[in-house]
Amino acid sequence: MHYSSSAVERAVMELSKLPGVGRKSAQRMVFYLLKQSPQAVNDLSTSLSDLVQKVKFCSICNNIAEEETCEICRSEKRDRSIICVVEEANDIWAFERTGDYRGLYHVLGGVLSPLDGIGPDDLHVKELLQRLDDSVHEVIVATNPSTEGEATALYLAKLIKPLAIKLTRIARGIPVGADLEHADEMTLSRALEGRAEI
Ligand code: ZN
């Protein structure tokens, strides 16, 4: 269905490009926005254009930033001897929410995926290696437990191990509230591997 207003049609088209949003949901959003105050719609539009104008990537860790470096890299309270390697910047916020990690991060910008044509040069691997001087004592590889995430972890291990820096992989476990009998073998064997003393 096409609308008599090209502005409506264009908004539907743009919104339906977002992940998880089909044309139907995009239509619902546009009609919702048309019922809001012009101020509310302007606020949304400004917040989106600010993404382009104001958001940069940290020159050290590739986290999102509004300055040359991100808040975490600038903070004096962080332990600079540990770097946690993640796939995407939003993984950082998952770790930050736990409040348990005080080290620094490095965002790879994806994972190795030969099928999609993504090789080491497409990720921020070189920049990671450049950070690994004497001040770094541990690198934690926190890529996802997917096939690509595991392959990327192995690839990084091959590069980092010869540097004599402690290299760890986050333990996989049983989700809180889950039953052991429902866990798949991969999760269970990872949970066993990553067991800790109590
Ligand atoms: Zn940073």
Image (cartoon, rainbow, N blue to C red):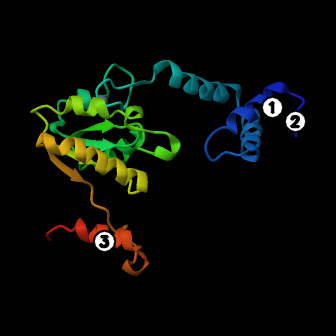
> Disc 1 marks which amino acid?
Glu
Which residue is disc 2 drawn over?
Answer: 2
Tell me if I can see residue 106 in this picture.
yes
- Mark 2 CB within 8 Å of ligand 1: no
Q: Residue 185 location, x and y as percent? A: 38, 74
Query: Residue 179 or 100: which is nearer the viewer?
Result: 179
Up the image or down, 178 lies above or below 84; here it is: below
> Disc 2 marks which amino acid?
His
Which is more foreground, mark 3 or mark 1? 3
Q: Residue 43 location, x and y as percent? A: 60, 26
Secondary structure at badge 2 equals loop
Q: Residue 19's image quarter? A: top right
**Upstream in the sequence, badge 3 or badge 1?**
1
**Upstream in the sequence, badge 1 or badge 2?**
2
Secondary structure at badge 1 equals helix
Badge number at residue 9: 1
Up the image or down, 165 lies above or below 67; here it is: below
Which residue is disc 3 drawn over?
Answer: 189
Give the residue at x 24% y 47%.
157
Check disc 3: other Cα within 10 Å, few if <14, some if 14-19, many if 20+: some
Badge number at residue 134: none
- Determine the quadrant in which ligand 1 lies: top left
Please say if the residues under marks 1 and 2 sit with CB atoms less than 8 Å apart: yes
Q: CA distance from mark 3 to mark 1?
A: 51 Å
Query: Residue 37 or 98: which is nearer the viewer?
Result: 98
